[in-house]
Image: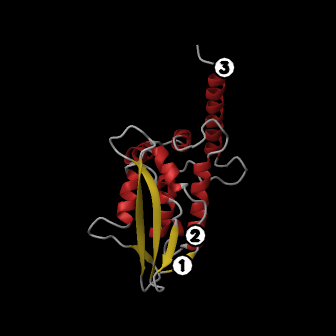
């Protein structure tokens, strides 16, 4: 027989998920403000498109009612919740804080900050460990993280990896991520994140809580 504590946790989790689904369907957050996750048809085209897998994107686009879309959105965030069973979803809150920061820092002609290359990396990988300027012509973001070693069951055995994302500034003021032919740089960062489990991706992007100041290189 299951212990009462486990039953209580499961009931609490179902209550929280149901309450979140209701708030999404109504288009409001718990605090009463308009929700970032209103179950509109184009939700999957917004900032969350960087997180959606192909299967999730396809399922959302097939959902034709607000109720079904609200359920999918609730499940999407529940899968990424670092503290399931509690009212807060720290990952979701962190993600939308980064959306706000991207929009305040990285807006470019014709694009909101979240839709730029720098916005994509910020929302996908989180804040870099260091951020340096390149003579006013670009930026370099460095990420240093520890990854579990494939083929070894012990989760404590990890390898330290350093990724860099380099952005060149164009004459029009846009910052474009350098796509190197050898597979290094920002593409290697994105590929490394794609190879992680959902839980590891959450930890990766929440490793830091603020954007470091830009330092001259």
Q: Earlier in the sequence, mark 1 or mark 3?
A: 3
**Residue furthest toward the left?**
181
Instruction: Give the residue at mark 2.
Output: 212
- Locate residue 89: give its quadrant: top right
The span from disc 1 to disc 3 (Cα, nearest Å) is 54 Å
Compared to residue 4, the image places residue 18 above or below, namely: below
The span from disc 2 to disc 3 (Cα, nearest Å) is 45 Å
- Locate residue 178: give its quadrant: bottom left
Q: Is residue 38 visible?
A: no
Instruction: Give the residue at mark 3.
Output: 4
Quadrant into which the N terminus falls: top right
User: Relative to residue 159, is residue 9 drawn left or right?
Assistant: right
Local secondary structure at mark 3: helix
Q: Earlier in the sequence, mark 2 or mark 3?
A: 3
Local secondary structure at mark 2: loop
Front residue (pair 12, 129): 129
Instruction: Give the residue at mark 1.
Output: 215
**Residues marked 1 and 3 touching at CB (< 8 Å):** no
Q: Dot 1: within a 10 Å radius of its alpha carbon, few (fewer than 14), some, or many (20 or more) residues?
A: few
**Residue furthest toward the front?**
157
Q: Position of residue 186 (x, y in %)?
A: 39, 66
Give the residue at x 60% y 66%: 101
The span from disc 2 to disc 1 (Cα, nearest Å) is 9 Å
């Amino acid at each position: 027989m299951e212990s009462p504590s486990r039953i209580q946790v499961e009931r609490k989790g179902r209550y929280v998920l149901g309450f979140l689904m209701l708030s999404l369907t109504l288009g409001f957050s718990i605090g009463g403000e308009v929700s970032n996750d209103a179950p509109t048809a184009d939700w999957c085209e917004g900032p969350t498109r960087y997180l959606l897998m192909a299967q999730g994107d396809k399922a959302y686009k097939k959902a034709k009612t607000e109720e079904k879309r609200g359920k999918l959105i609730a499940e999407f965030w529940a899968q990424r919740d670092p503290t399931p069973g509690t009212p807060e979803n720290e990952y979701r809150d962190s993600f939308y804080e980064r959306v706000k920061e991207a929009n305040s820092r990285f807006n470019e002609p014709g694009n909101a900050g979240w839709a730029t290359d720098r916005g994509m990396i910020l929302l996908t990988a989180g804040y870099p460990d260091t951020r340096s300027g390149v003579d006013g012509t670009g930026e370099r973001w460095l990420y240093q993280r520890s990854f579990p070693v494939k083929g070894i069951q012990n989760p404590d055995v990890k390898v330290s990896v350093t990724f860099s994302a380099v952005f060149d500034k164009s004459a029009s003021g846009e910052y474009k991520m350098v796509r190197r032919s050898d597979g290094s740089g920002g593409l290697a960062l994105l590929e490394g994140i794609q190879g992680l489990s959902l839980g590891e991706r959450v930890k990766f992007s929440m490793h830091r809580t603020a954007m470091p100041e830009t330092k001259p290189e």
